[in-house]
Image (cartoon, rainbow, N blue to C red):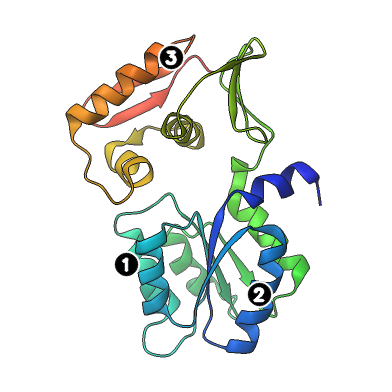
Amino acid sequence: MDENLLKQLKSYRILCVEDEDGIRKRLVSTLKYYFDDVLEASNADDGYDLYVEYSPDIILSDIEMPQRNGIEMVSKIREKDLSTIIIMVTAYSNEEYLLDLINLHINHYILKPVHSENLLNGIIEGFGDRLTTHLVFTKELYFNMEQRELLFNDEVVVLRKRDKEFLQLLYENKSRVTTYEQIEERIWKDRSMSMSALKTFIKELRQKLPLDIIQNVSQIGYKLQNLE
């Protein structure tokens, strides 16, 4: 595996939801090789509680579980959260079933049986273009994912953690508008976000940036401008 990708995975928190103890232990053991922060739950209800408490970046969940299944858990999460990466483990491959996963904005699915190779490949697929060495805003301005630093003409731009998370969120949505709801969920997390607080945050971030790359979309949110 590429060392840069491995270093990036280390910084993410993953939640594994699987009801069969033996399978879950094997999955968690493998995941700990790639991630420093691995949470585990044996059912969907506990999985949802851990999601609420710890805000994992990625959720890896089985579908068929007693009481509440993985689809029900994900449906509840997706009511207000479209940014967390969700990867489902399933024994089914029929089109109608997979369409349900697509409608829930699942980032990827892995067909059973799960082994280390298809697990890693599935996780990388689930990340999409979030795993990359550089997030390029312009030729002069880019974010180094490995070092977690924004650079302008190869000079570091000093930013807070929240600033960096916001720029990464904008980049992930570079082809569309990042909504107020997405910003609140990703940046404010479990706290309430007022519009005055958001405007102050954006104003202060713009003052730090050497180029104006944040475009306001009235009544909706923000998007990147001047890419490339």
The label shown at residue 27 is: 2
Q: How many marks?
A: 3
Asked if residue 15 is positioned above or below residue 13 in the image, the reply reads below
Residue ID at (50%, 31%) = 171
Q: Amino acid at mark 1?
A: Lys
Helix, strand or loop for disc 1: helix
Task: Pinpoint residue 154: horizontal percent, then vertical percent.
Answer: 67, 13
* Any part of residue 35 in sight: yes
The mark closer to the camera, 3 or 1, is: 3
Mark 3 lies on residue: 208
Q: Earlier in the sequence, mark 3 or mark 2?
A: 2
Helix, strand or loop for disc 2: helix
Q: Nearer the viewer, residue 179 or 58?
A: 58
The label shown at residue 76 is: 1
Residue ID at (67%, 53%) = 124
Q: Earlier in the sequence, mark 3 or mark 1?
A: 1
Task: Pinpoint residue 5: horizontal percent, then vertical percent.
Answer: 72, 46
Tag 3–tag 1 contact (CB < 8 Å): no
Q: Earlier in the sequence, mark 1 or mark 2?
A: 2
Q: CA distance from mark 3 to mark 1?
A: 37 Å
Asked if residue 176 is positioned above or below residue 12 in the image, the reply reads above
Helix, strand or loop for disc 3: helix
Tag 1–tag 2 contact (CB < 8 Å): no
Q: CA distance from mark 3 to mark 2?
A: 42 Å
